[in-house]
Amino acid sequence: MQLSTLAELNAERAARRPAVLVTDVASGEQRLVKAAAIPRDPLSDELGKHLRMGKSGMVEVDGKRLFLNVYAPTAKLVIVGAVHISQALAPIAKSLGYDVTVVDPRTAFASPERFPDVPLIAEWPDVALPPLNVDHYTAFVALTHDPKIDDPALLHAFSRDCFYIGALGSRKTHAKRGDRLRAQGARDADIARIHAPIGLAIGAVSPSEIAVSIMAEITATLRLPAKEKEQAA
Amino acid sequence: MLNRDEDILKAAEDWHKGGHGVALATVVETWGSAPRPVGSNLVINDEGTFLGSVSGGCVEGAVVTEALDVISSGQPKMLEFGVADETAWNVGLSCGGTIRVFVEKVG
């Protein structure tokens, strides 16, 4: 690997931008394709598929054996609301490899006893969220049911282009939330990005089951192509 | 997206900048039960120091030896390890899988 390629790859990784390294294993020839350049790459279909699955692998193109090594950032999950569902959601997400952070200004909720081994920030969203570097590779869920906490958190998530944004609440609650967020400058397209009611419809009842349905929806959003995603929703 | 091989490639860059010969080994194919997934990296420098893993410890020694060769020749190599391959390599994967490892020089 050329040193310049390696340096470029490391810069992309440091910036949490995904990239795919394409290696012709017969000749050793190599090129780095940054995520932004994938749509206009001759291998765009293969590259897009491997990146979406986060899976490296060998492909054969025009008689050449090419190894696609996918370098994608570790996904983050930001949970706003140190509630009962969050207590079940945090360990599930951790087991799936997410870096999990829980944010809740209410110290009675955000206590280490309730959330062992999870980074907890007992601050309001305007203080807690900016240092977290929320980005596209972040799933963001607002679970407090309290507009004073959930609304500013969701506005932050919109501005950071999170791949998944979900919020707890019935359709009625969500309609009111939409009105409030619009009044604070959110666009219709932003509101439409919120998964609400949150989670896949699996008939979840208990907090743990709701956590499973949320994590399933996040996984589907991460892994499924756009078309199949609509069918799963 | 859930790649945890955080500092291995950074080490490769730093070692090279520090004047070392460096090789990068990558698991490119696996069959059966393999200890490390496709895409896993191991970096090796000319002193035989290595970081990362391609097999969780089973074949690293052999990869390092081959990597030193790649560092001096500059020619990439494809290595294969597995229980079916004991005559070619005196090391194998006790888990019964087979892996193919691509080794290339950095720089």
Image (tube, rainbow, N blue to C red):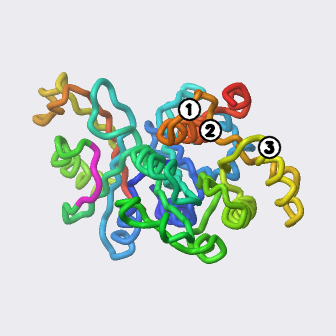
Q: Circle 1 sits in a helix, a strand or a loop, which is it?
A: loop
Q: Residues within 10 Å of mark 2 (few under 14, many from 20)?
A: many
The chain letter for the residue carrying disc 3 is A
The residue indicated by pointer 1 is: A204
Q: CA distance from mark 1 to mark 2?
A: 9 Å
1 or 2: mark nearer the eye: 1
Instruction: From the viewer's side, name the closer residue of A120 and A130.
Output: A120
Amino acid type, callout 2: Gly
The residue indicated by pointer 2 is: A199
Residue B52 among magenta residues: yes
Q: Which mark is residue A172?
A: 3
Point out the image quarter for the N terminus of chain A. bottom left
Determine whether A118 is above or below B25 in the image: below
Amino acid type, callout 3: Lys
Q: Is residue A140 visible?
A: no
Q: Circle 2 sits in a helix, a strand or a loop, which is it?
A: loop
Please report contact status of discs 1 and 2: CB closer than 8 Å, yes or no.
Answer: yes
Residue at 65%, 42% in the rendered image: A198
